[in-house]
Image (cartoon, helix red, strand yellow):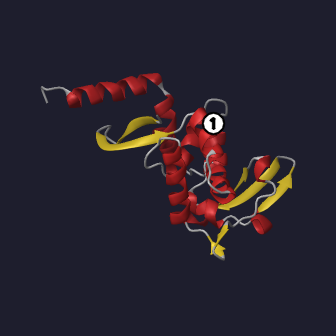
Amino acid sequence: MPHRIEFTDKNGKGTGRFRIWCSPQEIHDLLTVGATSSDQRIILTLLSRGLRASEAVKANSETDMFRDARGLILSVRGKGGKYREVPIPETLANAKFPIIRRGSPISTNTALTWTKEAGERIGIKNLSCHDLRRSFCQNALRTVPSEMVRQWSGHSSQETFERHYISTNDISFQAFEREKLEKALSPDN
């Protein structure tokens, strides 16, 4: 079962929507249940450095992928047309991007469909591409400094990054969220 925590607004009030991220085992399972090499490739690309679906489907291995002293790098055009360079796993070294289906590059909707199908195969309903992005960030924070994870994932604001990722790793924040949920479910409300 994926990890869930309720979104809060800027005032700390619950919104009824939840953040979801997958454990390392669930990520492993996702990478091994792909029906085709194409859907495995998009899932690995989304998970590899927290790419947005729109960034992953626009990647071009001939123009955007290169190798330097850091290893295999993907130049990504993110939100607002900003470019960043992210290291990607060697398992994508021979991958061809964009991923072609029926003669044209896949869309973000196709990436979402493949992600949902992979999630269902391992027992996670309604898994989204953004859940894979969140999964990368949450799991990377266990071993990589938050500034590096923020840069790789393309978050321009440290404040936004911390609100969505750092706080959910914090035990006191989780206790606070659990207490809010218990209050909301109590018969006195």
Pointer 1 local density, CA inside 10 Å: few below 14, some 14–19, many at least 20: some
Q: Work out whether 128 lies above or below 96.
A: above
Residue 12 position in % (x across, y down): 32, 37
Identify the image quadrant of the C terminus.
top left
- The residue furthest left is 188
Image point 60% across, 52% down: which residue?
A: 154
Q: Taking 41 as reference, is 186 above or below it? A: above
* Residue at (46% x, 41% y) in the render: 20
Quickly name the residue at label 1. 140
Residue 178 placement, left or right of 143: left
Mark 1 is on which residue type? Ala
Q: Report which quarter residue 150 is drawn in.
A: top right
Where in the figure is residue 30, as x and y percent of width and height? Answer: 59, 44
Specify whether 38 is left or right of 4: right
Q: Nearer the viewer, residue 105 or 183?
A: 105
- Which residue is found at the position 47% from the left and 42% from the top? 124
Regarding mark 1 in the picture, which secondary structure is present there?
helix
Residue 127: tell me if it is visible.
yes
Q: Is residue 134 left or right of residue 16?
A: right
Q: Looking at the picture, does residue 107 appear above or below residue 49?
A: below
Residue 158 seen in render: no
* Residue 113 place in picture, x, y as percent: 51, 59
Residue depicted at x 43% and y 46%: 125
Foreground pick, 158 / 72: 72
> Which of the 4 quarters of the picture holds residue 186?
top left
